[in-house]
Amino acid sequence: MRNLSLLQRFKCVDLSFPGSPQCFSIRSETGTVLVASELAITEFDPRTQEVHKEVSLTAEEYLPEDGSGVVVAIQDLPDQESVCVATGSGDVILYNLNTSQLECVGSVESGLTGMTWSPDQELVTLTTGQETIIMMTKDFEPITEVAINQDDFGEGKFITVGWGKKETQFHGSEGKQAAQRKPALPWDDRKPRITWRGDGQFFAVSTVCPQTGARKVRIWNRECVLQATSEVVNGLEQPLCWRPSGSLIASTQRHPNKHSVVFMEKNGLLHGDFNLPFGKEQVKVKELLWNSDSTVLAVWMEDLKPGENEHPNTYIQLWTVGNYHWYLKQSLHFGSEPLRALACVCWDPEKPLRLHLLTRGWVSYTYDWGWSTDRSHGTDYHDNANVAVIDGDKILLTTFRQCVIPPPMCAFELQLPVPVNLVTFRSQAQRTNELAALTADGHIYVYGQGDAKIQAGMLTGVSLPQVASNISSFVVYDDFLLLTTHSHMCHCLNLSTLSIKGLQSALSSDAHQNDETVRKVERGSRIVSVVPQDTRLILQMPRGNLETIHHQALVLAQLRKWLDGLRFKDAFECMRKLRINLNLIYDHNPTVFLANIEMFLKQIDSINYINLFLTELKEEDTTTTMYPCPSRSASSSVSGKGGKKVDIICDALRSTMETLDPQKYCLCILTSHVRKTTPELELALQKVHELRVNPPSGSSSVSAEEALKYLLFLVNVNELYEHSLGTYDFDLVLMVAEKSQKDPKEYLPFLNMLKTLEPNYQRYTIDKHLKRYRKAIHHLSKCGEEHFTELLNLVKDQRLYSDALELYSLNSEQYKTLSVAYAEHLVEQQQAEQAGLLLWRCGENARALQAFVSCTSWRNALAVATHIPLPPEQLALLARDLAEKLLEARRHKQAALCLEQYAKDCEEAISALIQGAAWEEALRLIYLYNRQDIIETDLKSALLDAHSNQTSFLESQKALFIRHKNRLAVVQELKAKARLELFDEDGPDCADAELYSEASSVLTGSHLGSKYSRSNSRISSRSSKNRRKAEGKKHSLKEGSPFEDIALLNALTQIITIVDKMRVHSLLKALVLFQFDGAASSLQRDYGELLQLMETALPEIWTDNLQQGQTPLTGPNSTANSIMASFQQQRPAVPQQDTEALTAPKMRIAVKWKLSILK
C-alpha cells in the first residue's frame, strides 16, 4: 500500500552539445551521463550541468560529418575505464576515459543494429544487418556467431502428448484465424531487441520473422545456444526487457480491443499481463525498462496518431505490482513540442528509484522517487486511519478504523479524470479525513464531506540528515516513532525521551532488546498505519496481505491514557483481550484508583470481570517489573495507604461493594476475603452461613448453595472443611462436608463426639485438631483446674510459655508452675540468667540463686543470697566461689569486689587486683586496710615483673615487625618483575593476566612453582570446615606461598593493633611512684620508639597504589604490552575477603600515655 513520491528533480536546460542525442549511458562511479550523438560523445553532470569530456566521432571518420551517422548503443565499462560505442555502419569503438583516445576494436561489414552487454560485463552481444548474433568477450574476442531466426524451437522444446498442433485446436468465436500468425504492426521499427537476465545466464532477442513478418522472442543461454522460442503472440510489439531479479520477460501486445504489457517465462510461454490506460490505437510503446531492484516498470510511450499539424505527445508511466495487481503510480507528460520529445530514457544502475531522461532539445531530467505510505495524520477518534493508494486515475481508500481490507481491494474508490501522481491528507484537527490529490496535468483535487474542488497548489521538499539505514518503514504517531527494520523487528520509541544517539543505539542492538519497545515481525513487514486512540498497528507483508498487531508499547501508552481518564471499562476490556496483567489498573496510580473504586465497579458492571481482577492481584508492582514506564517517577506508584497491596485493594473493593449492593456483589465479596494475603476463610464461610440462615429474596441474588459452590472453586475443599470446623459452627461444617468427597463415616463420628463435650473443651479439641495451639490453650484455661496438667503438657510440647503466662494472674499457683517450667526450658537453652529472673520473680529464690551462679551473674546471685538471706558463712563461701569464676574469666576487679565486700578478705582482693595489673585500685585497698606490708612483699616484685614482660614483648614485636616489613618489600619487588616478564611473553590478553596486581602474590603455578595454585581450585567443593582450613593455609607466612604478601600485611596489621592498645601508662605511674625511674624511662623510651617506627612505616607499607588497586605501569622498565595491560585491567586483584589487608590500620595518635617527668 505504498506510493511513489517525488523526492527531488534535477533539470538541465542550457546544454548545447553537437548533433542530436541518440543514446546514453550512466556512469555508476561518478553519476555523470555519457551521451552519444551523430557527431560526438559527451560526458556531463546532470546536477551541475558541468561538461566533463567531449570527443568527436567525425574527426577520425567513424561517422560522416553530414550528420547521417547512427549510434545504436553506448555502454559505460567501469572495469576498463572506457566507453563502448556501436555505430550503425558496423564499427565498435572504445573510448578511454583517462586518455580520451578513441579506438576501433572491431567492425562488421553488414552494419550493426544493436549492442548489449551482459550484467557482469564479461560478454557483449551484437546484432548485425545480416540478422545474426555475434557474441564476444569483454576483450572483444569472438566466441560465436549464429543466425537470429532459426527454425528449431531450442533445447527446451516441449514434449508433445498427442493433442495435435495448436493451429488445428478449437479457438472459440474467433475461429482458426486466431492461431494464424499476423505480421508486425506498421509502426514497428523492425529492429532486433536484446535483453539479459539479471544473473547474466540467459538473454532474450525479439526480432521480426522474415517468413511470417511477425515478432518472435527467442531465449539463448550464455554460450549462445538457443533454449526456447516464444509461442505465437499476435500483435507483439518491439519493447523487450527482462526483469533483473525474476524469470519474467516484459513486452507489449496490441489486442483488437486493448493494449497490454505482457510477460513471458524463460520457456517462451505467456505468464500474466496488465492493460495500459489508453485506447486500442492511441499510443505506441517505445521501450520498457525495469529498475535495478525489479520493483518498478517504466513504460515509454508516444501518441500513435497525432492531429493535423501536431506532433505526438510523449509519456512515461511507472508501474508497480502488489498482490498480483499492477498499479500505475506515476504519469509524466512531456507534451507535443518536438524539442521536448524524449530521445533517451534509462534507470540509474546504483539508485533503484532514480530515472534519467534526455530530450531531443538537449534537456536533461533526473527524477528521484521514494516509497511512501500516504495516511491520515489525525490523533483523535474522528480520524478513520485512512490510507490512500494511487492506481492510475483512481485513489483506493481504506479506513482501517472500521475495517482491514487487503489490497488490491479497498473500502472506497475515488475516480479522477486523469492519472494521479500525489495524494496527501489534511493535518488540521477534526478534518484529517480530507485529502488532496495532484494529477498528472497539474491540478489539485480536494475531497472532503462528499465534494471535490480544484485548487492551485505548490509542493515543497525537505531534506533531513540520515540517522539510520536499517529502516524498512516508519510512522510517527502521537509521542511515538514506530519503525520496522531489515532485521525483522518493530520498534516503538518514545519521542519525548528519544535522542539521535538513543535511536541509533536502539537500532544497533535489536537482538539484545527485550522490553516493551521492540518485538519481532514477519520477514519483510512494513508499517501501513496506526489507528489513532487505539492499539492497532497495521502491517503489510511482502506478498501484499495485511496483518493487525498490537504493539505492547502502543497498548501500554493507550492503557495509561484510559486509566488517567478514568475509562476503566475500555482499559479492562483491552487488557483482557490482549492478556495484559490486570494489576496495572491499580499500579498505574494507586491513589486515583482507591479514590474512584465506585466508578470502577459501575463501569465494569460484571461479576465475572471483578472476580477476574481480584484473582489476578499480586504484591508485585507491575509498573516497575513487567511494564515500566520511562517517563514515570519512582514515587508515583506508591500507594497512599500503608500495608500490603492485595489487602488494601480487597478491603477497599469489599467495603464499596457492601455499600452499593451486597447481594449483587456477593461472589465478589467472597473473592475479596479469599484473595487476601492471609485468606479470611472463616469470614467467607460465615457469610455463606448467613445466606443459609437468611436467604435473600431478590431474583438476581446468590443462594447459599451457589456461594458455597463458588467458594469451593476458589479454595481446596479439604482446606475449607478445616476452616469451617474452626468456626465452631457444626451446621456450616456439615454444609461444607456435604459438598466435599468425604465419606460421612469419616467426619460424622468426630462431629458427634465434639457435640457431647463441654463448650470450652469442645473448642479446645477442635483447635488442637486444627493445630491452632494458641487458641487451644486459651480455651483449655477456661475448663478448670482439673485440665491444668493437660494444658501444661501442651505448653511444654509447643513451647507456648509466654502465651500461657498471659492467661493466669501473677499470684496464682498456675502462674508459678508455668514460670518454673519456663525457667527449666530457658536453662536448657543456655539462658540461665533469664531463667533466674523468672524464678526470682515467682518466689523460687533458691533455684534462682542456682541459675545465677551457673551463668556467673554475680551481682544477681549476691542480691538473691542477701534476699534469702544466707548465713554470713555461706554468703562468704558463695562470694569466694564467684570470685574464683571471675578470675578464670580474667575479670579481676569484679573478683576483688566480691572478695572485699562479701568474703571480707582484703588480702585476697588486693592479690586479685595485683594479678590483673590494676595498680591504682590495689594501692587504694592497701592503704584502706593498712596493709603496707603487701607493697614490699607482692606489689613491687609484681611491678618489676610486669616491666620485664612488657620490655621483652616490645623487643619481640619490634623484631617481628621489621622482619615482616623487609620480607614484604622483597615479595612485592619479585612479584612486579614477574608480572612484567609475563606481560612481555604473553601480552595483555593472557588468560592469567587479570590475576596479577599490586596486591596479588602469585602469577601462576608454573611461574612460581607454588603447590597451592593447583589445589586451591578445588576448595569450593569442600565442607565449610575444610574451606576455613584451606583459607588458613592460603594465608601462610611461609616464603613462596601463593598469598604471602596478604599474610604479611595481616601480620603487620595485627602487630600494630596490639602494640597500639598496650596499657603502659598505668604501669609507668606505678614505677615512678616506687622510685623505679630507670625502669620506667627505659619502658617509655622503648615503647615510644616502636610507635614511631610503626607510624613512619605505615605509608611505606600501605602505599597509594596498594590501596587504590592496580595503576598503570609506566617507567623505563615497562613495555608496550605491560602498559596496555595495566590500562585495560579493571578487575579487583585480590579476593573480597582480603581487601581489609589493603587498608592501613588506624593508630591512636591522640592518646596521651607519656610521663613528662621521665627522660
Image (cartoon, helix red, strand yellow):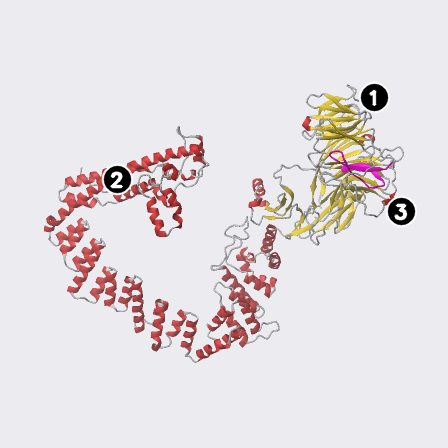
Q: CA distance from mark 1 to mark 3?
A: 51 Å
Residue 18 lies within the magenta run: no
* Residue that label 2 marks: 960
Magenta stretch: give its range: 213-241
Looking at the image, which residue is at 43% across and 74% down?
A: 766
Rendered image: mark on residue 174: 3
Q: In this view, which residue lies farthest toward the left?
A: 933
**First in sequence: mark 3 vs mark 2:** 3
**Callout in the foreground (3, 2):** 3
Residue 142: x and y, percent?
75, 27
Q: CA distance from mark 3 to mark 2?
A: 121 Å
Q: Neighbour class for label 2 at 10 Å: few (<14), some, many (≥20)?
A: some
**Callout in the foreground (1, 3):** 3
Q: Is residue 575 visible in the rendered structure shown here?
A: yes
Label 1 element class: loop
Could you say which is closer to the camera, residue 40 or residue 914?
Answer: 40
**First in sequence: mark 1 vs mark 2:** 1
Residue 842: x and y, percent?
28, 69
Could you say which is closer to the camera, residue 380 or residue 38?
Answer: 38
* Residue that label 1 marks: 66
Left or right for 112, reference 615: right
Q: Neighbour class for label 1 at 10 Å: few (<14), some, many (≥20)?
A: few
Q: CA distance from mark 1 to mark 2?
A: 114 Å
